[in-house]
Structures are given as C-alpha cells and as structure tokens.
Image (cartoon, coloured by chain):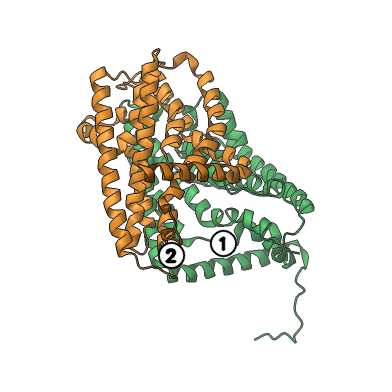
Chain colours: A green, B orange
C-alpha cells in the first residue's frame, strides 16, 4: 500500500501521464454515475420506456414513406431502418456522455461554477464536456443496436471486417464532430450569457440524421456534411457497411474531426479569456 | 358579466406585464423559433424528394409544401406548456397564495401563454416568410378572405383546446404526486396524432376513421388543412363543428376536474 509519505510521481509529468490521469478520472465519473443510477431506478425505467416510444415514433415517417414507394434514390426501406439504428446509437451516446454537461453550460457561466472548475488540476474543457454521465440513456444505444441489426438482416447486407471498421471509425468521427459543433454552440455562452435554447436548435437539426443524405437538395447536403456534419454520424457509416465507401471518405472524416477539435479548443481558450467570474 | 369583465381586465394587465418582462429574452425567442421550424423544413425536403422520386402519395406537391410551411406557425400558435408548471404550483403549494386573490391562478397561465406567443410571432413570422418565399412557386393559396378567416378562427379554437387539455392533465396533480410522465405521454402522442410529424393525409387507409375524428387532429392538422387542402364547404363546416364540440367538452371536463381538485386540495406550506 502506498502512503502519502512515499515518493510519488508528480501530477503533471508529460503529455501521456496527463491523458492517463484524465482517463482514470473519467472512469471514476462513470463508476459514480452507475452507482447514482442504482438509486434512481424509476428514472432508469422511464428513460427506457420514453426512449423506446420515441424510437418507434421516429421510424413512423420512414415506414409511411416506404409505404408509398419501394426505394428513394437507391435506398431501400431496410437500409433506412439500419440508418435509423445508427442514428439512435450515436444520439444515444451523445445523450449519455455529452448532453448532461453541455445543458449545464449556462449555469456554469452565470452562477460562477466555472471558477471552481478552473481551480482543479484537470483540463477545464475536459471537465466541462464529460463530467456528468446519464447512464440510463445507454438503453437507447442498446435499442439502436437492435434496430441496426434488424435493418441489416432485412437488407441482406453482409459487411466484412474492413467495412465494419470503416463504419465504426466514421460513426466515431460523426460522434466527435457533432459533439464539437454542440460544444462550440454552447461556448458561445461566453459572449451571449444565456445559451439554454441552443440545445433545442441542435437537437432539431440532428433530426436530419434520421434520413440518408441524398434525400436532401444539394445545398443542404453540403451543409449536413461540413457545417453540421450529421452525415458522418449516420449516412456514411451505413454506406460503408454496404461496401460503397473507400478509405478516402474515412480519411476525410478523420481530418475533419481533427480540424473541428482544434477549432473548438481555440474557441474555448478564446472564451476563457473573456470570462470574468460571476461569483467573485 | 362583471366577473368576466374583471377577469379580462386582469388578463390584459398581466399579459402586458409579462410581455415587458419576457422581452428581455429576445435572443432566446429567436433561437427557440429557429428550432421550431427546423423539423417542418426537414420533413418538407424529405417528402418533396419522395414525390420527385415517383412515390405515389395521396396528396400532391402543393399540399405537402403548403402544409409544412404553415406547420411551424400553427404548432406555435396552438401550443401550450403550462401542464408541468401548473402541476408544480399545485404540488408545492404556490396555489395557496392565489386562492386568496381575486383572480384564478389559471388567469396567470392565460396571460403567460398570450404574452409568449405574441413575442414569438416577431421571431417566427419573418422565418416563415423566408421559407414561404423560397417555395412560393408550389404553394396552395386560397384566394378568398373567407378561408383565411376560418383559418384564424380554427387556430384560436385549437389553441383553447390544447390549453384545456393541459389544464385537465395538470389538475390530476391534486391527487397524484408526479404528473411528468403523463405530460410527456401527452406530448409524444399529440406529436403524431396532431399531424405535427407527418400530415394526417399520409396516414394509412386502415387508420382513417380514427385519425380523422380524434381530438388531436383539431389542435394542429385541421387548421392547416383549411388552407393547404381541398376541404369542401360541407367538410369545413363539419370540421369546425367537431372542433367546437371538442373545445366545449374538454373545457367542461377541465372545469369539473379543476374545481373538484380545489376542494380536494390540502395546501402545502399553509
């Protein structure tokens, strides 16, 4: 057993250690969130039920649409259902890990809670973006996986390991990109004071991800690929699973993700400079 | 008669006060209304693509376009958000301080509803105007003033209908500890059955009889149909009649449940 009297590694020794420390910390956050969830079993159940109902209702327009036609721009009903599954997985992950934090951004800034965060020996951006975890929302990820499986079986797609890797990487890029966009929108709180309704705009724009990119006019497609990159979260992974995409798109996705992360980092730094504590 | 006049005066004063207070959040209203028109626009683009791709819909492009352009406006105009707040006022005993005042707590919610809608208009109407202008070539526009007047009347009735349904649900807080699940269920069910997600005209044939006559159609879909659809004079009259019927039934129900609740109310914190 180690005691405080012993020689210990200093807190910040190099880049790798810092990342490891954040990872360990995040594991603690997660463990705490799981324990917390066991205290609120009713919350778990209602989240599960509401999630299932919303998933069902979200598929209604798709089912109605394909009641009138066999395929739209090369997409069959089964493929669109697989896409809804991917959408559910990505938005479920965001609701679990990101949404509980970004929804607090206004209080962080207006109530001066950010002061306490800045004093801690962790990256403040890490803390503000990933501190709170809503474990119950993971049920939506599970139902998303089920819907994806149903869609894949119905469409008789049998993706190989390469396609699966491509799809997972693209979906991960989509997840990070959307998080970056939402973060950027929330960080505007530094300049606008109240950004609570921003979450509503984000969530209603994300709804576009329920449909394949080609369902939209060309101008909107560009917007949904580069400005509000929901295409990486749903359309591209499913097309990768179908074997229609090469590594080039994956490369573009990764590059775009890196650019977005850098931009958000810069925006955060810039915002911190304008921050004048609300409590002191 | 005197009581009605007094209540109207209270509503007018409180609405004015609320508007003054809420106009602090001008930016927030713009952002809210932006979110409000996102979903109709996405749906509009999807269904137009389906039509252009040769889908055999029971309605034409003009109907779909007009429907979704007007949808954001009508959902805003007929919306109500009081259930959660009213239930909270009942549960936490805030109602007590209103029971000794010369006006009902419900008057506060009427004033809040009116004032927020008034402010939202300024943010929403220009946005709808832009969408309208983009799609102006394929919109259904009734020429006569009559249809627009009916549209306005029907929106008013729809707004009252949603408001009374919300009072009814919130009143259950007199007996239940937590009505959030009920409120959420109402929102989810209404979003589909009111036609706010998919036009009711696109619902499958087997659901027709039910879909056309359930109350939620008269909260959103019916007012839009007056402008977008080709409802005959007979259908218009019948629709307005049914809408008025629902308003009267739900208002009576809400009144009964509300006053029963007031008698059952045991104040918290009094």
Dot 1: within a 10 Å radius of its alpha carbon, few (fewer than 14), some, or many (20 or more) residues? many
Q: Which residue is mark 2?
A: B93
Percent of width and height locating residue B91? 41, 63
Q: Is residue A83 above or below residue A97?
A: above
Note whether residue A56 is visible. no
Q: Is residue A41 left or right of residue A2?
A: left
Front-most of residues A127 and A162: A127
Give the CA separation, mark 1 to mark 2: 32 Å
Q: Is residue A19 above or below residue B52?
A: below
The picture quadrant where one finds residue B264 is bottom left
Image quadrant containing the N terminus of chain B: top left
Q: Is residue B227 above or below residue B174?
A: above
The picture quadrant where one finds residue B146 is top left
Which residue shows up at 22% across the image and 31% down it? B208
Which residue shows up at 49% across the image and 19% down it? B135
In the image, are marks 1 and 2 on the same chain?
no
Q: Is residue A165 above or below residue B244?
A: below
Percent of width and height locating residue B143? 40, 12
Q: Give me the chain letter of mark 2.
A: B
Identify the secondary structure beneath mark 1.
loop
Note whether residue B196 is visible. yes
Q: Which residue is mark 1?
A: A132
Outermost residue to the front: B2
Mark in front: 1 vs 2: 2
Figure label count: 2
Percent of width and height locating residue B217? 30, 34
Percent of width and height locating residue A96? 51, 56
Q: Is residue A10 left or right of residue B238?
A: right
Front-most of residues A49 and B108: B108
């Amino acid at each position: 057993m180690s005691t405080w009297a012993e020689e210990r590694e200093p807190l910040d020794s190099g880049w790798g250690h810092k990342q490891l420390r954040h990872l360990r910390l995040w594991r603690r956050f997660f463990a705490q969130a799981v324990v917390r969830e066991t205290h609120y079993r009713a919350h778990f159940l209602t989240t599960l039920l509401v999630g299932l109902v919303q998933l069902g209702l979200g598929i209604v327009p798709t089912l109605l649409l394909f009641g009138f036609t066999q395929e739209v721009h090369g997409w069959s009903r089964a493929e669109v259902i697989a896409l809804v599954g991917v959408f559910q997985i990505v938005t479920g992950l965001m609701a679990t890990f990101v949404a509980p934090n970004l929804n607090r951004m206004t209080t962080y800034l207006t109530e001066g809670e950010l002061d306490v965060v800045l004093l801690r020996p962790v990256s403040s951006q890490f803390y503000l973006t990933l501190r709170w975890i809503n474990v119950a929302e993971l049920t939506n990820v599970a139902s998303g996986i089920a819907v994806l499986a149903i869609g894949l079986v119905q469409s008789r797609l049998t993706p190989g390991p390469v396609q699966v890797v491509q799809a997972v990487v693209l979906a991960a890029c989509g997840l990070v990109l959307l998080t970056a966009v939402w973060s950027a929108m929330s960080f505007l709180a530094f300049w606008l004071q109240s950004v609570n309704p921003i979450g509503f705009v984000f969530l209603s724009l994300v709804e576009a991800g329920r449909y394949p990119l080609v369902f939209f006019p060309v101008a909107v497609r560009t917007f949904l690929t580069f400005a509000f990159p929901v295409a990486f979260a749903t359309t591209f992974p499913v097309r990768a699973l179908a074997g229609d995409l090469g590594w080039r798109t994956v490369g573009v996705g990764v590059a775009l993700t890196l650019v977005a992360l850098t931009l958000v980092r810069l925006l955060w730094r810039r915002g911190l400079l304008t921050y004048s504590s609300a409590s002191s | 008669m005197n009581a009605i006049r007094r209540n109207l005066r209270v509503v007018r004063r409180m609405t004015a006060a609320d508007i003054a207070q809420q106009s602090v959040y001008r930016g927030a209203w713009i952002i809210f209304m932006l979110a409000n028109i996102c979903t109709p626009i996405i749906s509009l683009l999807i269904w137009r693509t389906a039509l252009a791709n040769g889908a055999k819909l029971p309605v034409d492009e003009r109907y779909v376009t007009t429907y979704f352009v007007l949808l954001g406006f009508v959902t805003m105009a007929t919306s109500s958000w009081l259930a959660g707040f009213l239930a909270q006022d009942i549960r936490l005993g805030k109602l007590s301080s209103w029971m000794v005042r010369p006006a009902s707590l419900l008057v506060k919610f009427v004033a809040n509803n009116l004032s927020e809608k008034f402010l939202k208009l300024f943010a929403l109407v220009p946005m709808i105007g832009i969408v309208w202008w983009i799609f102006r070539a394929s919109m259904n526009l009734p020429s006569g003033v009559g249809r627009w007047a009916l549209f306005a009347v029907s929106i008013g009735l729809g707004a009252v209908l949603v408001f009374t349904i919300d009072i009814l649900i919130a009143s259950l807080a007199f007996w239940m500890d937590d009505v959030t699940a009920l409120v959420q269920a109402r929102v989810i069910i209404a979003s589909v059955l009111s036609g706010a997600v998919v036009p009711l005209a696109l619902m499958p044939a087997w659901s027709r009889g039910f879909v056309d006559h359930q109350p939620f159609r008269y909260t959103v879909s019916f007012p839009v149909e007056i402008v977008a659809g080709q409802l005959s004079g007979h259908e218009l009259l019948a629709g307005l009649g049914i809408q008025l019927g629902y308003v009267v039934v739900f208002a009576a129900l809400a009144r009964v449940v509300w006053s029963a609740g007031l008698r059952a109310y045991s104040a918290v914190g009094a």
